[in-house]
Amino acid sequence: MLFLAVTLGFFVENQREHFIENKREREYIRSLIIDLKKDTAHALLHLRRNIQRFHGLDSLEDLLSREGPIDSATTFHLYDLSTKYTRNISKAITNEITIQQLLSSGNVRLLRRRGVYDSLVLYQVRKQLLFNGEAVYEEMGRRVALLNEDIFKMRGYREIIMKSDTTFPRSYKTINLQLMTTDRTKLIKYAQVVETFRATVSSYVATLNTVKNSATNLLIFLENEYHLD
């Protein structure tokens, strides 16, 4: 009887621990799913912004590289493109709290379903590649920003924007806006940096798209495995 009581006690305790760990596992997965949904939405937002930046930089580089005099319409277009696409870089931010709690602690043992741990690690690896690329992205953004100061008179541009109407296309003939310099050597140098920045943005977009797809696949996998709803 004593042996039976002890055995039953162990069994009950094991079942209780199994229940608690199963509950904690599902709580972690629920939190991960919420994070992944936010990551996916955030990635989509910054993908759109950076794809727009890529095309805007392409147009800017094309205008800068054209031969011949720069008229008032082209000047305004250069200001417009530079303001929209060479300033305020757009970096995606991912949620790290839940996944770090799992991967950097003993709680990862709670993930008992096959493939979950490997999928999380793969997602983290792809996010790390994105983080690594951000340093280059930021550096190229700084380089373009420094050259902007030698090309554009932003104070005059801001005053024109504040005074102009919102109709499109604007009447360029009424705009008295000039570049800081029309020296072809300086403009070509600026165009080359813009082109390098465009290539950097293209690389960032490709990596961010990989992260977005990885988040989407992981989200689908977790939802199919756990059926939490």
Image (cartoon, helix red, strand yellow):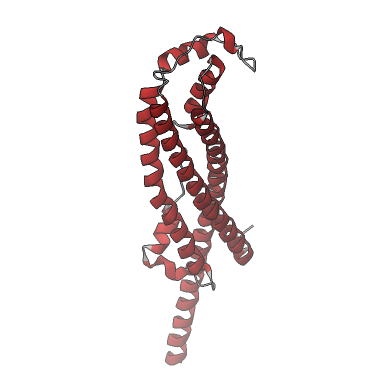
Residue 87 percent location from the top left of the image? 44, 30
Q: In the figure, residue 41 lies in which quadrant?
A: top right
Write the residue at 58% across / 40% down. 48
Write the residue at 50% across / 72% down. 112
Frontmost residue, 25 versus 189: 189
Residue 15 percent location from the top left of the image? 50, 76
Write the residue at 60% across / 63% down. 221
Can residue 64 be seen by looking at this rendering?
A: yes
| Up-down relation of residue 165 to residue 4 (above or below) | above
Q: Is residue 128 left or right of residue 218?
A: left
Residue 72 percent location from the top left of the image? 53, 14
Frontmost residue, 15 versus 115: 115
Frontmost residue, 198 versus 165: 198
| Up-down relation of residue 199 to residue 109 (above or below) | above
Write the residue at 42% across / 26% down. 184
Dividing the image into 4 quarters, which one contains the C terminus?
bottom right
Frontmost residue, 29 versus 155: 155
Residue 118 percent location from the top left of the image? 49, 69
